[in-house]
Amino acid sequence: MEQVHIGFIGAGGIAHRHFEVLRGFHDVKVVAFADPLLERALTLSRRCNANAYEDYRVMLDKEPVDALYICVPPFAHGPFEMAAIERNLPFFVEKPLSTQWETAARVAQAIEAKGLITGVGYHWRYMTTVDEAKALVAQHPPQLVLGYWLDGTPPPGWWVRDAESGGQMVEQTTHIFDLARYLVGEVESVFALGARYPRPNFPDADIFETTTAALRFASGALGSINSTCVLNWQHRVGLHLFGEGQVIEISEFDAMIDVGRGRPVTRSEGDPVVREDRDFVDAVLGMGNHIRVPYAEALKTLGLTLAATRSAKEGREITLKDELAYA
């Protein structure tokens, strides 16, 4: 294979981001888009002389695609992934994998049975600053972990409905939970609290507007990951790690490493989405699989965020290996 023919299921904002990256690769041709809102599919298809469909099944029947990008809301996952698996199509899927553990676990099992190439959109793992942090924490393992997603409420109507988004920890702060797993290791148990806040502008909201999750890592480290969506701007999004004589503060664009001699800040180089898309395409082309977050790895992060959300709802500590069997 010299060129990958890619189809998109879902043509919203995150699909636009991946499309802009893929259209810059000489060995990729985006051939089709499917979206129940046909005009969204047409908007992207016109930009690359691709075909547009309302029904993804029609697209899969008609288009000779080599791989898929699945960019749909959290509640919609499941049928698209299973359709790809049935056709032996490698696929890249945006996080979170689902709002339901059973759905994602069923997909993971089917992927494993087929040995299919997959990638998931946890692009923070591809930042150059995270590469540097990974090397540093290997020398000085973190003992305290503080994470933040303190922001406004995204515009999609489904985002504030628990059954459709899973809540902020599952849909948004998942990037911070995933980065904590990547840099610190697996979580043994979680105890979370959640609070509701009446908001006239969001009458349909039933998610926690504020959460805090206390984590106990298998390494012995302790952590707290805090989220809120009540602001009108992004105040702080990142992960802070405290080890012996070392502090690392990571945001989506830079990192600060403090060893007691000032607070130097380093910008992350390049676009991590380009790196994650390149790894996926290379794997499909047979040029080696260096994908940092295949589906099975992302399933562990989903398990953690679902456990944290369940803990906040039920008011109890959850031990992950007992509740979600992913340890």
Image (cartoon, rainbow, N blue to C red):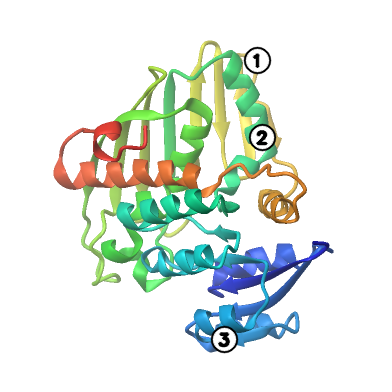
Q: Residues within 10 Å of mark 2 (few under 14, many from 20)?
A: many
Residue contact between numbered discs 1 and 2, judged by CB atoms under 8 Å: no
Measured as percent of width and height from the top left, residue 305 is found at 35, 45
Instruction: Mark yes or no: residue 151 visible.
Output: no
Mark closest to the chain's N terminus, 1 or 3: 3
- The disc label shown at residue 261, or none: 1
Please state which of the two labelled residues, at mark 1 or mark 3, is closer to the viewer: 3
Q: Quadrant of residue 177?
A: top left
Left of 108 or right of it: where is 29? right
Measured as percent of width and height from the top left, residue 142 is found at 48, 20
- The disc label shown at residue 121, or none: none
Left of 270 or right of it: where is 9? left
Q: Residues within 10 Å of mark 3 (few under 14, many from 20)?
A: many
240 vs 274: above or below: above
Measured as percent of width and height from the top left, residue 168 is found at 36, 53
Mark closest to the chain's N terminus, 1 or 2: 2
In the image, what residue type sits under mark 3?
Tyr
Secondary-structure class at tag 1:
loop
At 75% from the left edge and 84% from the top edge, which residue is drawn? Answer: 49
Please state which of the two labelled residues, at mark 3 or mark 2, is closer to the viewer: 3
- Residue behind mark 3: 53
Q: CA distance from mark 1 to mark 2?
A: 19 Å
Q: Quadrant of residue 218?
A: top left
- Residue behind mark 2: 129
321 vs 269: above or below: above
Give the tally of numbered discs.
Answer: 3
Q: Residues within 10 Å of mark 1 (few under 14, many from 20)?
A: few
In the image, what residue type sits under mark 1?
Arg
203 vs 143: above or below: below
Secondary-structure class at tag 2:
helix
Please state which of the two labelled residues, at mark 1 or mark 2, is closer to the viewer: 2
At 41% from the left edge and 65% from the top edge, which residue is drawn? Answer: 77
